[in-house]
């Protein structure tokens, strides 16, 4: 696998600015107009892509009153799985107008398919990539089917152990995926930052040999921006118009100004990484004169001894470097030197 991939003409990897995916998910709250408005918000915020999810309640589960199908904890407690997915899904007939709006705004759009019929729908819409959600990372048949399109794939790894991630990765590669990214993910809604374990990002890059990113469910932008500094090349965050509007994902979603901050500051964090090195940077050139150097601090006559009383290491930096102080103490002035003169070798008897 390569350490870069390309989605819709945008190169993604450690050598390129972080790729920010604005996850619309269920924050349309049952309104196509709201979904289209969120696409506009993602574009205005500077996201690289907007992502939706393609499923129905019937493609994910069954309508059952049995205990196995009831949610008893977390943000969706009190609902059945069927009720949650019926509430949260993006109707399939909305997909085309949402895709069209994104393209009108010059924004890349793709989706997370949750079964093979979803992949077929997205293929008809010309989706440039596929995202496999964390909960589906163990659905190898779905991964194989999506991989068979030959499109770039992103797989979220929440809850998956090392063997499961390896199995998903191999399944994708064996079935036609040549461009793959894995997202480190903690499937908590929201996720406490102290459980994010961002050091896993570098480990995943070494273990799996592909582009690594973060699917982040913490509150705010700090964790995601920190992930960029640790090597994340993609950042996925849920976003909404206003958290107070509620909805399945609202509690852990960014508001527009926060999404804009993430898009801006994650790129600043990447730019700040630069490369390892100790050479003086261009911005430092004007500051160089404020370094310490050796100066004459008392008038000195020709032939007079240089001492710590008449030579000091002070600012600015036009004189000899301070490291030569012990070498020149005890030597003699070649000529008269006035106070405030930067010390140079041609002022010292015998030179360097």
Image (spheres, rainbow, N blue to C red):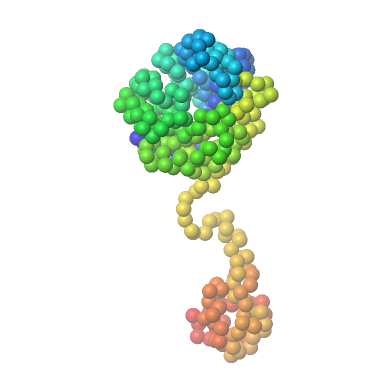
Q: Residue at x 52, y 37 (%)?
A: 196
Q: Is residue 18 above or below residue 122?
A: below
In this orientation, does residue 9 appear? no
Is residue 51 visible to the viewer in this orientation of the structure? yes
Can you name the residue that lies furthest to the left here?
174
Q: Nearer the viewer, residue 184 or 145?
A: 184
**Where's residue 103, x and y in %?**
53, 21
State the residue in front, 205 or 272: 205
In the displayed image of the protein, which residue is found farthest to the bottom? Answer: 303
Above or below, 223 relative to 85: below
Count every numbered label the image shows and give the total: 0
Q: Looking at the rendering, which quadrant does residue 116 occupy?
A: top left
Decide which of 231, 129 is in the foreground and name it.
231
Residue drawn where x is 66% and y is 25% of the image: 243
Left or right, 39 with reference to 55: right
Quarter-of-image position of residue 115: top left
In the image, residue 244 lies at what x, y percent?
A: 69, 24
Identify whether 327 is placed above or below 198: below
Q: Position of residue 4 (x, y in %)?
A: 41, 36
Residue under the point 36% across and 19% down: 141
Q: Nearer the viewer, residue 80 or 101?
A: 80
Which quadrant: the N terminus?
top left
Query: What is the x, y in percent for residue 341?
Result: 64, 77
Q: Residue furthest right?
A: 244
Up/down of 326 relative to 103, above or below: below
Q: Quadrant of residue 178?
A: top left
**Residue visible at 62% across and 80% down in the picture:** 311
């Amino acid at each position: 696998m390569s350490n870069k991939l390309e989605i819709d003409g945008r190169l993604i990897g450690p050598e390129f600015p972080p790729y920010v995916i604005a996850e619309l998910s269920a924050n349309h709250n049952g309104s196509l107009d709201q979904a289209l408005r969120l696409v506009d918000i993602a574009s205005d915020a500077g996201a690289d892509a907007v992502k939706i999810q393609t499923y129905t309640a019937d493609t994910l589960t069954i309508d059952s009153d049995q205990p196995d199908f009831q949610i008893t904890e977390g943000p969706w407690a009190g609902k059945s799985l069927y009720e949650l997915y019926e509430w949260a899904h993006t109707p399939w007939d909305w997909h085309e107008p949402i895709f069209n709006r994104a393209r009108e705004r010059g924004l890349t759009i793709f989706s997370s398919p949750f079964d093979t019929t979803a992949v077929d729908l997205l293929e008809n819409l010309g989706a440039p990539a596929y995202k496999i959600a964390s909960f589906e990372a163990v659905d190898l048949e779905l991964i194989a089917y999506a991989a068979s399109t030959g499109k770039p794939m992103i797989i979220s790894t929440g809850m998956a152990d090392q063997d499961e991630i390896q199995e998903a990765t191999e399944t994708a590669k064996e079935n036609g995926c040549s461009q793959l990214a894995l997202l480190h993910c903690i499937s908590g809604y929201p996720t406490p930052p102290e459980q994010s374990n961002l050091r896993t990002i570098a480990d995943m890059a070494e273990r799996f040999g592909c582009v690594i990113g973060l699917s982040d469910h913490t509150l705010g932008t700090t964790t995601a921006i920190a992930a960029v500094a640790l090597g994340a090349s993609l950042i996925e965050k849920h976003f909404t118009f206003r958290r107070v509007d509620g909805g399945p994902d609202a509690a852990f979603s960014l508001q527009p100004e926060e999404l804009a901050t993430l898009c801006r500051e994650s790129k600043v964090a990447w730019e700040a990484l630069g490369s390892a090195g100790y050479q003086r940077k261009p911005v430092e050139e004007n500051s160089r004169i404020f370094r310490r150097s050796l100066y004459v601090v008392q008038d000195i006559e020709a032939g007079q001894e240089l001492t710590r009383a008449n030579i000091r290491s002070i600012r600015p930096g036009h004189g000899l470097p301070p490291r030569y102080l012990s070498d020149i103490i005890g030597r003699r002035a070649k000529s008269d030197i006035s106070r405030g003169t930067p010390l140079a070798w041609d002022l010292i008897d015998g030179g360097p």
